[in-house]
């Protein structure tokens, strides 16, 4: 069966020297996935990106087609055909093949990647395992009460950010979704909302807050459980709370009074919560607090996801395997075990014997043991730019950039699927093209019809 | 010139209720994926003959109400790793992908399992319009069956606003626009009005058909009646699919009866009616009892109304619903993990793990009430088999339900394992009726095809899609139906004796009724004021459908 056969939309042709305007283009730089961008394109450059934030502008305006071969094998230029053949050989020769990344590829390409992994009895993992993986695990423990971003804009009268710094990581978060919009039930926009920011340091976001609460580092769990206790009306020792959280008890009880009094509360949380001491236990505390708050009023929570299509990766891997990330197919069927089948572990434990890295850079940001092992095994890398990971790859593909050169589908951080409107064509193939060609060869080698 | 490439199913015992064929030995001829008349020239030979002598031949099964794709289903998959590791595993083969089971199977597993069960068409019952693209993406990864989905609109702001302003022409255009934009199949109402109230206040819900929805000032009755009328005027193949208010609540039967009356004679389908047929005091489980009889009397005398059952089976499963307040209620009853998600302008969602126990009086009654529905509706064309997969249980339980319906001894044996009080609170013990194979063929294929307005499905006359299931007769009907001998989809043999032989992706069934295009300006103005995505990025284009199949309106347009 052909997988991921939905054809990606091709960009409209560019006429040399003429300006072309793309309306309602989608920015895939961060999880906000703003889809109201107006791009002006001249030749192979975007010269204007209306409504894009500082990160989005940089994403669009600095984009240039990489002047390097679409494929290299062991660092030497090769044809795409040679690259596909070599990639398929590497993946089918391995006993423990792994595939990682995916969060900056459209769903159409992600689906093909999962197919390949299925055929080769491999392990599939996404960058979720190093960002909101703990939130995914917490969700499996307690569930989640959440909503789409438009609900926040229309109803959210109390907005909390916990361990998240959207002013720098998601610059349009405040204006487009969470603080400034004049919503259906909040006609005065910002004036109708209370913004609370909880963090271990005074981030650039802090000045947007009505209330900024600076807690002791590594004390998120204690702070969240203080709030859970207050929500349930359990008596606490104020001195102990102060000592543990670094914040006066009265601040917490005042916050809880406000949380109970609001109509629709929202907690956005980030890696300041999920990747610090406690990890999934922190996320679980926050999700449980949100659930508890629904005994008093309406309250929801939402992880502020980073990569443009990390949410799509969670969805695709889940609908195809039943599990969101860290999925092993060694027995021919999917098994899930974060900490075992997640990439930082399969590498650091020296289990993987070949790899395919898609739109990610583990050579730059994984642990030393994981990087050493990756450098020692043959792997394939697909990326739009040259990175430490592509440089050490056995086979490296320079691919077209999704949302700029290629179409497809991405999922916003609230699971809303959004189509891409590419600006201009790239001489490089898309992730989808490369992966599809590799899949064809893998199936041929394995005798799969 | 080569002769046409016919396939012939030879000498099977054919059950084709739509064409009045009740267990007659016949040949079925297939050409280019469709059933055709036998060639006039007796010398024409089929290139492939399937010997079905002694076997039972029926059209492929149609599941008209299940949850198999989209955001809610996928969240449930992610949420329940614990039930997958210990359950059945689905390894990949040289022609099929691997998958996982549990109560919410992965996409590929869903497609293979439906096909292996002899089902060739299934409809997801609750897709939020903004997530339609997601459902279509999953459909493309759900092989072997034709698919479609119903579009949530019972709490849609534009729907309520049109009713509030008494603008039926706008409502009608909006319904058609929304179905067209999402490539959906039918309007779905889930707890009409109640989900909007849930979004706006703690434990919010409507209490009955005449509670006004905050901010909009409309009642569930107005939503039901308004949408039913608009859908009838649009001549939609499946006009309106209704999940009533007050699902699961003791005493909710009156709400259900009022919903039927609110249809004002317009055609309407009441779904998983088992969950809506309860007597008893307000919220009081101790007085919980069956109220199937008064409801079934109404259905028996009102041919405009059809129902599917939403049968409960004993065991563990996952409850998933577009009914946000119901999800909250269930999570409090069971105390487990709870997912809830509110979707802007459109809908809600609730998910929680649940377990039905035969030793629980309430659960046993739910089981009995479901069976009462099948057995008490006089005209089998008005009742359809469903478990509301996975809410009452898995679609894989259909063979067991068939056995309950065809074998009163088996039914009573299971009833004996339930708390004795059930005998006073339901009539199941006294019912002697046993279904015939012809009636089973009605409630699992011919009936749903008619209710859905699918002229090419659910029968084996010339022109029908060649979706055909061949069963080996067996005294134990569960054995007979759980592993068909052969399953044919679009003329191709996909399954033989439980083994997948070939796969295909299948068609997506959707509608595109005509409507007043001028209303789009008004819709756009409203949309751009409140939605968080761009107007142009909302509609799903045809590239998302592997194979589009537009089902015409009942007017034929």
Image (cartoon, coloured by chain):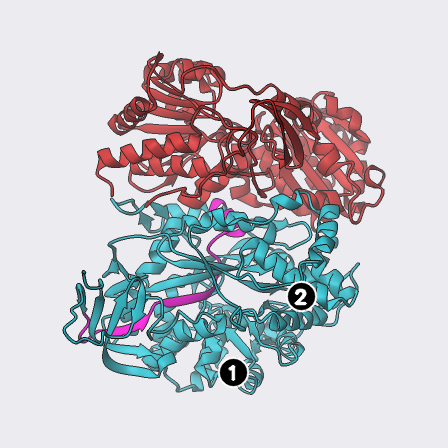
Chain colours: A red, B cyan
Residue B53 lies in the magenta-colored region: yes
Residue B197 placement: quadrant? bottom right
Q: Could you tell whether A179 is left or right of B282 in the image?
A: right
* Chain for numbered disc 2: B
Crowd class of label 1 (few under 14; some 14 to 19; many from 20; radius 10 Å)? few
Vertical comparison of B343 with B22: above or below:
above
- Image quarter in which the N terminus of chain B is found: bottom left
Q: Nearer the viewer, residue B549 or B298?
A: B549
B463 relative position to A140: left or right: left
Q: CA distance from mark 2 to mark 1?
A: 46 Å
Magenta extent: B51-78
Q: Is residue A61 magenta?
A: no
- Residue B176 on image: x %, y %: 61, 62
> Please, which residue is most extreme toward the left here?
B43
Disc 1: which residue: B424
Q: Quadrant of residue B209?
A: bottom right
């Amino acid at each position: 069966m052909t997988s991921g056969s939905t054809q990606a939309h091709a960009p409209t042709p560019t006429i040399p020297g003429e300006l072309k305007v793309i309306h309602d283009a989608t920015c895939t730089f961060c999880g906000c996935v703003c889809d109201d961008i107006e791009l002006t394109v001249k030749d192979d450059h975007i010269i204007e990106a209306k409504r894009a934030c500082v990160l989005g502008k940089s994403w669009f305006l600095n984009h240039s087609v990489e002047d390097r071969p679409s494929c290299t094998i062991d660092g030497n230029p090769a044809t795409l055909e040679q690259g596909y053949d070599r990639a398929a050989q590497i993946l089918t020769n391995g006993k423990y093949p792994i595939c990682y990344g995916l969060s900056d590829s459209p769903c159409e390409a992600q689906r093909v990647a999962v197919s390949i992994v299925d055929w080769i009895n491999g392990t599939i993992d996404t960058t979720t395992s190093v960002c909101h993986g703990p939130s995914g695990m917490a969700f499996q423990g307690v569930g989640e009460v959440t909503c789409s971003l438009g609900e926040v804009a229309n109803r959210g009268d109390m907005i909390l950010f916990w361990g998240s710094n959207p002013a720098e990581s998601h610059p349009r978060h405040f204006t487009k979704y969470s603080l400034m919009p004049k919503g259906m039930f909040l006609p005065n926009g910002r004036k109708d909302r209370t913004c609370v920011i909880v963090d271990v340091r005074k981030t650039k976001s802090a000045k947007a807050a009505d209330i900024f609460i600076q807690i002791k580092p590594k004390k998120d769990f204690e702070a969240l459980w203080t709030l859970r206790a207050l929500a349930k009306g359990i008596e606490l020792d104020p001195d102990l709370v102060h000592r543990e959280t670094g914040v006066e008890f009265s601040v917490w009880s005042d916050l809880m009074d406000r949380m109970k009094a609001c109509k629709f509360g929202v907690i956005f949380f980030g890696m300041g919560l999920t990747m610090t001491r406690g990890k999934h236990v922190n996320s679980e505390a926050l999700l449980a607090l949100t659930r508890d708050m629904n005994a008093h009023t309406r309250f929801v929570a939402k992880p502020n996801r980073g990569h443009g299509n990390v949410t799509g990766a969670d969805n695709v891997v889940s609908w195809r395997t039943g599990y969101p990330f860290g999925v092993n197919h060694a027995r021919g069927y999917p098994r899930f075990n974060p900490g075992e089948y997640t990439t930082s572990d399969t590498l650091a434990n020296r289990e993987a014997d070949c790899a395919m890295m898609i739109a990610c850079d583990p050579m730059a940001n994984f642990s030393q043991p994981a990087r050493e092992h990756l450098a020692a095994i043959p792997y394939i890398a697909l990326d739009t730019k040259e990175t430490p990971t592509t440089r050490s790859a056995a086979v490296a593909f320079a691919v077209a950039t999704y949302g700029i050169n290629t179409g497809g589908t991405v999922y916003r951080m609230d699971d809303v699927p959004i189509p891409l409107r590419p600006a201009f064509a790239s001489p490089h193939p898309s992730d989808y093209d490369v992966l599809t060609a590799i899949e064809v060869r893998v199936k041929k080698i394995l005798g799969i019809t | 010139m080569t002769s046409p490439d016919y396939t012939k199913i030879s000498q099977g015992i054919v059950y084709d209720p739509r064409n009045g064929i009740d267990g007659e030995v016949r040949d079925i001829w297939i050409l280019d994926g469709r059933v055709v008349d036998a060639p006039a020239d007796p010398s024409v030979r089929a290139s492939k003959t399937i010997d079905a002598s002694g076997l039972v031949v029926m059209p492929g099964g149609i599941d008209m109400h299940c949850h198999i794709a989209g955001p809610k289903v996928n969240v449930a998959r992610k949420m329940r790793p614990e039930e997958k590791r210990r359950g059945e595993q689905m390894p990949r083969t040289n022609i099929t992908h691997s998958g996982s089971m549990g109560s919410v199977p992965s996409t590929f597993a869903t497609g293979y399992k439906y096909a292996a069960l002899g089902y060739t068409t299934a409809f997801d019952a609750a897709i939020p319009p903004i997530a339609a693209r997601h459902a279509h993406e999953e459909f493309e990864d759900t092989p072997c069956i034709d698919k479609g989905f119903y579009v949530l609109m019972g709490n849609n702001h534009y729907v309520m606003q049109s009713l509030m302003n008494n603008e039926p022409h706008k409502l009608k255009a909006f319904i058609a626009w929304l179905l067209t934009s999402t490539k959906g199949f039918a309007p779905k109402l889930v707890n009409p009005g109640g989900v909007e109230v849930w979004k706006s206040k703690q434990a919010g819900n409507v209490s009955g058909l005449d509670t006004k929805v905050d901010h909009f000032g409309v009642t569930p009755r107005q939503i039901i009646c308004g949408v039913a009328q608009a859908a009838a005027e649009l001549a939609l193949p499946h006009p309106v699919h209704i999940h009533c208010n007050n699902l699961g609540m003791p005493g909710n039967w009156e709400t259900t009866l009022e919903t039927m009356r609110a249809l004002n004679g317009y055609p309407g389908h009441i779904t998983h009616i088992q969950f809506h047929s309860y007597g008893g005091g307000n919220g009081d489980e101790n007085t919980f009892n069956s109220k199937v009889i008064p409801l079934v009397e109404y259905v028996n005398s009102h041919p405009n109304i059809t129902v599917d059952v939403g049968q409960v089976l004993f065991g563990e499963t996952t409850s998933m619903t577009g009914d946000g307040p119901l999800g909250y209620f269930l999570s409090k009853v069971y105390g487990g993990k709870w997912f809830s998600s509110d979707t802007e302008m459109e809908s809600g969602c609730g998910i929680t793990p649940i377990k039905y126990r035969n030793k629980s009086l309430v659960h046993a009654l739910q089981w009995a009430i479901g069976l009462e529905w099948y057995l008490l509706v006089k005209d089998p064309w008005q009742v359809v088999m469903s478990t509301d997969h996975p809410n009452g249980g898995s679609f894989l339980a259909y063979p067991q339900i068939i056995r309950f319906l065809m074998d009163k001894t088996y039914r009573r044996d299971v009833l004996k394992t339930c708390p004795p009080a059930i005998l006073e609170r339901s009539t199941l013990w006294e019912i002697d009726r046993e279904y015939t194979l012809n009636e089973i063929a009605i409630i699992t294929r011919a009936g749903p095809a008619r209710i859905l307005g699918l002229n090419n499905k659910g029968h084996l006359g010339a022109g029908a899609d060649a979706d055909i299931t061949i069963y080996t007769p067996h005294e134990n009907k569960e054995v007979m139906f759980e592993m068909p001998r052969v399953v044919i989809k679009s003329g191709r043999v996909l399954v033989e004796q439980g083994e997948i032989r070939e796969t295909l992706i299948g068609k997506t069934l959707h509608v595109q009724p005509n409507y007043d295009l001028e209303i789009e300006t008004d819709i756009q103005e409203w949309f751009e004021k409140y939605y968080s995505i761009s107007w142009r990025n909302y509609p799903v284009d045809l590239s998302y459908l592997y194979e589009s199949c537009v089902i015409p309106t009942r007017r034929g347009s």
